[in-house]
Image (tube, coloured by chain):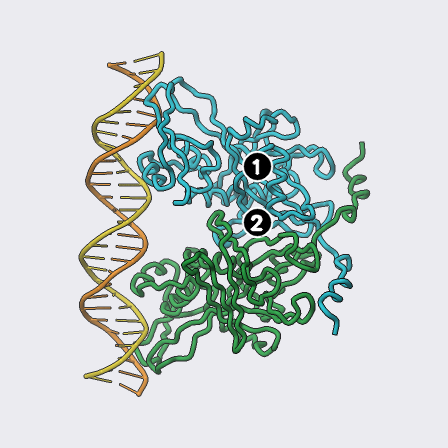
Chain colours: A green, B cyan, C orange, D yellow
Amino acid sequence: METEKEFLSKYRMEDYERPSVTADVAAFMIRPEDKTSYRKNPENKLLLLLIRRGAHPFRDMWALPGGFLQKGETVEECALREIQEETEVRPVSILPVGVFSKPNRDPRGWIISHAYASVISEESVKQAGRDDAADAQWFAVSFTCSDDGCYHLTLTYAEIRLEAVLAAEKTCFGRTSFRILESGGIAFDHAAIIAAALSALREEAKNYEAIFDFLPETFTLTALQKVQETIMNVSVLPANFRRMVSGYVEETDEYVRGEGHRPAKLYRRKRNA
Amino acid sequence: METEKEFLSKYRMEDYERPSVTADVAAFMIRPEDKTSYRKNPENKLLLLLIRRGAHPFRDMWALPGGFLQKGETVEECALREIQEETEVRPVSILPVGVFSKPNRDPRGWIISHAYASVISEESVKQAGRDDAADAQWFAVSFTCSDDGCYHLTLTYAEIRLEAVLAAEKTCFGRTSFRILESGGIAFDHAAIIAAALSALREEAKNYEAIFDFLPETFTLTALQKVQETIMNVSVLPANFRRMVSGYVEETDEYVRGEGHRPAKLYRRKRNA
DNA sequence: CAAATAGTGTCTCTAAGACAATATCAC
DNA sequence: GTGATATTGTCTTAGAGACACTATTTG
């Protein structure tokens, strides 16, 4: 009878075929649009970071940032590293979206992808700069469900317009997975990953937890509300929203002045609630 | 400039080091305990399937059923296949619990595990038989949080008693991950996987969706209630439970008779609600 | 009848939605 | 003052928890 030590010394991982493992990240940001009047508060736009592929396959098409899992790191660390490599921002939290492992999802071979959704405050990105790289751009996101049950994902940046069409495949435990009908020029199965990430993010935004990561340390309650409305694509009455988040935030002594209307008190996230 | 076809023909996956990928499944079942009186309804026990390892490492210790991802299948299919190999039952739905990829979690080398929780109706297991294999047993589950914040996972089968102690590491988006303080004789990091699976399952049982999988096609509302109470470790007033699930179930014409008290109507799950 | 569960009705309390009303600034 | 948002208060309604009460069976 061999001992465990003997067994391990003989064990060779190379005897079995293994897949390559990647982490892909749907990194979202919210940017205020230009003011239409000096009085009005700006509208918000939901943005998604895409990278133009410089190599085959899907060369010159747009894809989610991501990369191969390296030895010595967890999948989550890999996702954080990948997003930091592109934005120079390390997000505080990432949301696991799912594992994409259909056999032929990647023409290079057997590659399974771990998808995460990440939310980044616009200020962090500004401070980090690095918005110039022509191969990395923030696309405006539109994701809606039409009457026939098809989901339309539209990503726009300047003249570039990527339009994917998807069908909801199944809803399992509150998470929906999507089948790609039209990839719309998005590389790999990333259209389905983006749809799943948006769907998961909308689900999470209900809990008033994910939304704080989109904003700087201090924020107005209206800004917080706009963030939730932008993610979830709904609108709430301000009075009710304030009541709902009151347990999650605490006041500061500062105000935002010079906006052409009553100044708003700045709040910060309440920890340990 | 090479074409995509040329590129792919030169591309060799073997140039990069890759991890082995597994799927591990925490398969739960609910079994009624013996009646204490001819009148009383039986209490329920939450059971978890464990396999005694026949090979190194962790030889003769108990582990979750699971195995390596094979070419041509998705990770989810792999999990379903593994659980079917052990129980001869293919669960209708499995709940993704998380990816476990800490570098040294497996002494054999670089192996990342995809954890799923599965719920199996006792009837399916009975019909499939196969409860005899000495290397696969259903352990009674107890999972509680003590005053000092430590979680105690106790698995018992006959004289075997596995007692693990864990600390909640972080709660991210409603899911808690655990750090093992005492493995209690459970192989690999499976104690942490089991804790995460239980925690995820309890979260899901709130939605009255996961709980149907524990029961046969038709069931009494009391049985359904006991299932939820067993998973979530709480108790609800029968009147309120009935009101809550009323939208998820529909009546049949059948009754359960001969129980020493008023017979209960059998219900079935309402689809497309 | 007794013991037990099956099932119904209703009171209360809380949380969410709707909306009215007031406060405060820049111009 | 005007136009906009900020902030507070209150009416209404839906849903969950608590609990009392009735129904029905077996031994």
Residue B214 at x, y percent in the picture: 48, 35
Q: Is residue B160 above or below residue D16?
A: above
Q: Nearer the viewer, mark 2 or mark 1?
A: 1
Q: Which residue shows up at 66% across the image and 49% down it?
A: B112
Chain letter of the residue carrying label 1: B
Residue C19 at x, y percent in the picture: 22, 64
Q: Is residue B113 above or below residue B13?
A: above
Query: Residue under circle 1?
Result: B90
Residue B158 at x, y percent in the picture: 58, 25
Residue B172 at x, y percent in the picture: 51, 54
Check the picture and name the quadrant holding the N terminus of chain B.
bottom right
Q: Which residue shows up at 46% across the image and 73% down it?
A: A31
Q: Is residue B9 left or right of residue B27?
A: right
Q: Amino acid at mark 1?
A: Arg
- The residue tagged with tag 2: helix, strand or loop? strand
Near-viewer residue (B35 or A197): A197
